[in-house]
Amino acid sequence: MLIHPKIDPVALQIGPLAIHWYGLTYLLAFGLFLLLANQRLKHEPFRSVQGPGAWSRKDIEDMLFAGVLGVVIGGRLGYCLFYKPGFYLANPLQILYVWQGGMSFHGGLIGVIVSQIWYARTRHKPFWQLMDLVAPCVPPGLGCGRIGNFINGELWGRPADPELPWAMIFPQSGTNLPRHPSQIYELLLEGVILFVVLWLYARKPHKEAQVSAMFLVGYGIARFTAEYFREPDAHLGILAMKMSMGQWLCIPMIFAGVLLWVWAETRTDPAGHPPAGGRPAAR
């Protein structure tokens, strides 16, 4: 049976300066985003946009900066609101203690959306075109985060059949039960498979917002599935209909993605004509 190696979370210590593996996975995530987003600029409809609205490498860097702020602020507030609202209402200053852990993907997603709305308005970019550029570049970064979770030995899985070849004991869980390495499942579902699907889907002509819609649906399904193998938060446990908080948060995400795809399929531009797939809509 496999046993989690209990990797030291500190990758490098230089005097009082400690560089954590989790921080390095974030840096890798941002680097992959820059690489993939700049590659996306070579694809349609972005390479066809000319004049003042043309996309550039500087746009990608500024979008990333805004997105990082959205991830950190939204992720932290989302965790406080979705997972421990009572505790943080009673201890509001604890919200600032981000070094103690506690981030929510769904809160981070909301934060990113808000930050990109701001960016699109201040830079006069079509919001849905911007989100369609970003969406396929996100999954590898999510995968990097799951690698960080595995290194830290956190967010382990539910008890597994001891006969499962990759069942793993996580000493950090306080038990010697064999468990699903759910961090690896999420790495594969959210980081690898979702990336391949979205990247290939985005290469074909689609109406604005449909790539973003596919991200919402795809991530929602991937996370909903992985939650069946991930140990629920101890203070929440299994909620109504035998689902975890993560699954309940994925349901509106999936429905929003479906509605967004349908809306994009049926909407018309200001001139009254449906936007052609693969070309930027009139604005």
Image (cartoon, rainbow, N blue to C red):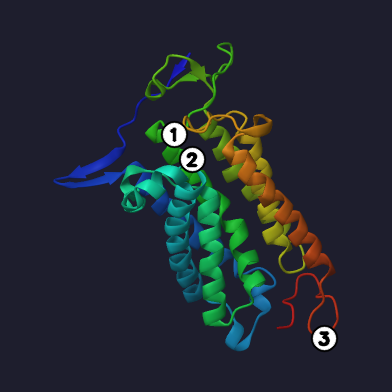
Give the residue at x 46% y 68%: 66
The residue labelled by disc 1 is 150
Question: Residue 269 occupies which quadrant of the picture?
Answer: bottom right
Q: Considering the image in quadrants, where does the C terminus appear?
A: bottom right
- Nearest-to-viewer mark from 3 and 1: 3
Q: Is residue 107 left or right of residue 222?
A: left
- Nearest-to-viewer mark from 2 and 3: 3
Q: Mark 2 and mark 1 in contact? Answer it, CB < 8 Å.
A: yes
The residue labelled by disc 3 is 271
Q: Along the polypeptide, which appears first: circle 3 or circle 1? A: 1
Q: Residue furthest front?
A: 90
Disc 2 residue type (three-letter): Arg
Q: Residue furthest left?
A: 15
Q: Mark 3 and mark 1 in contact? Answer it, CB < 8 Å.
A: no
Q: Mark 2 and mark 3 in contact? Answer it, CB < 8 Å.
A: no
Mark 2 → mark 3, Cα distance in angstroms = 45 Å
Circle 2 packing at 10 Å, graded few (<14), some (14-19), many (20+), is many
Disc 1 residue type (three-letter): Phe
Q: Secondary structure at mark 2?
A: helix
Horizontal and vertical percent position of residue 133 = 62, 66
**Residue 11 seen by the camera:** yes
Disc 3 residue type (three-letter): Ala
Mark 3 → mark 1, Cα distance in angstroms = 51 Å
Horizontal and vertical percent position of residue 274 = 84, 75
Q: Which mark is residue 146?
A: 2
Give the residue at x 59% y 81%: 54
Horizontal and vertical percent position of residue 27 = 39, 53
